[in-house]
Image (cartoon, rainbow, N blue to C red):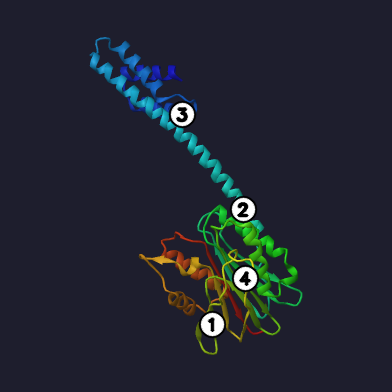
Amino acid sequence: MLDMYENLLSKYIRDSNEQLLYSGQKLSRQSIENDVTPEEIISIHKSVIQETYPDIPKKVLDSFDLLLEVMIGYGLVYREHLALKNQQQEINSEIEIAANVQRTLLGTQIPQVSSLDIGAVSIPAKKMNGDYYHFVEDETGSISVAVADVIGKGIPAALCMSMIKYAMDSLPESRNHPSFVLENLNRVVEQNVDITMFITMIYGIYDTNTHEFTYSSAGHEPGFYYSAKEDSFHDIDPSGLVLGIDKSIKYKEYKKQIELNDMIILLSDGVTETKSEGRFIDRKEIIQLIRNHMHLSAQNLVDFVYKELERMQDFELRDDFTLIILRRKGL
């Protein structure tokens, strides 16, 4: 490789042209591939110049020594940079695999129920999701829905979500009692999650026979309830301590009768903490977005709200984003 550079430089000194310059560009790529350092090239360059022009002033030759010292330092830093870049690529590849595994593990199907129109969207701020939502339809036709949020992002939050999911799967006998579900999960979190991490959750059961929604919350972001009869929105804001703080805590259950065209709107704080033009948007702005597009299906509605709030943040989510809408419809 160094012989190639020596020959190329000799030719260029005799007959400088653009074709030889282009050959120099290709030689640069080959040098990197063959681990030829910049200082080695400069050393050859100095030798060729000295042989071609034996009368060249000593000060000019000495300037190559300065350049050589600079390139030695540059070469060391550049090699460190390449090593770190390769490590980062390996880490990114592993995170991408982990994210795919997480999507598979936490995947859930939106139930197809004749009396309900359901829409859901959950988008991570980074590759791994610190939000979690889940649907289960039991043999009686009841739909359970859960939304959880780890206060934090990235891999630690994602690991917590995986634990929550499998803890829920292990509690089928209490699934029809939201307060029991949260109390069991609270004990799991208290025993297994670092005290610096906090998990909020809302869990509810929609009875498709009586159209009653029973729910409990562990410090989760308040959702909304839309009354079609009143044409008004109300907060769903049940009290409850976040998971993992006190293993003996008891959670309250709340009930809401759902009438035709009423909506239940559940969300994570990635929705309400949307920041636009240096300020957090008001909950009323989210309500207005939903109100203005209630003619859409539930899925199209949540997709629209997500895209609009993403646009307001210059297409860069600052937190994991989860939004679910359940709307009672006629048979």
Residue 39 screen position, x and y as percent: 39, 22
- Which residue lies under the disc numbered 2? 100
Residue occupying image coordinates x 62% and y 55%: 102
Residue 79 screen position, x and y as percent: 45, 31
In the displayed structure, 173 sits above or below 153; it is below
What amino acid does circle 1 point to?
Tyr
Q: Distance between the residues labelled 4 and 2?
A: 35 Å
Q: Tags 4 and 3 in contact by the CB under 8 Å rule?
A: no
The disc, 1 or 4, on the residue closer to the chain's N-terminal end is 1
Q: How many labels does the image show?
A: 4
- Which residue lies under the disc numbered 1? 226
For disc 4, the neighbor class at 10 Å (few under 14, some 14 to 19, many from 20) is some
Residue occupying image coordinates x 31% and y 13%: 50
Q: Distance between the residues labelled 1 and 4?
A: 30 Å
Residue 194 occupies which quadrant of the picture? bottom right
What amino acid does circle 3 point to?
Ile
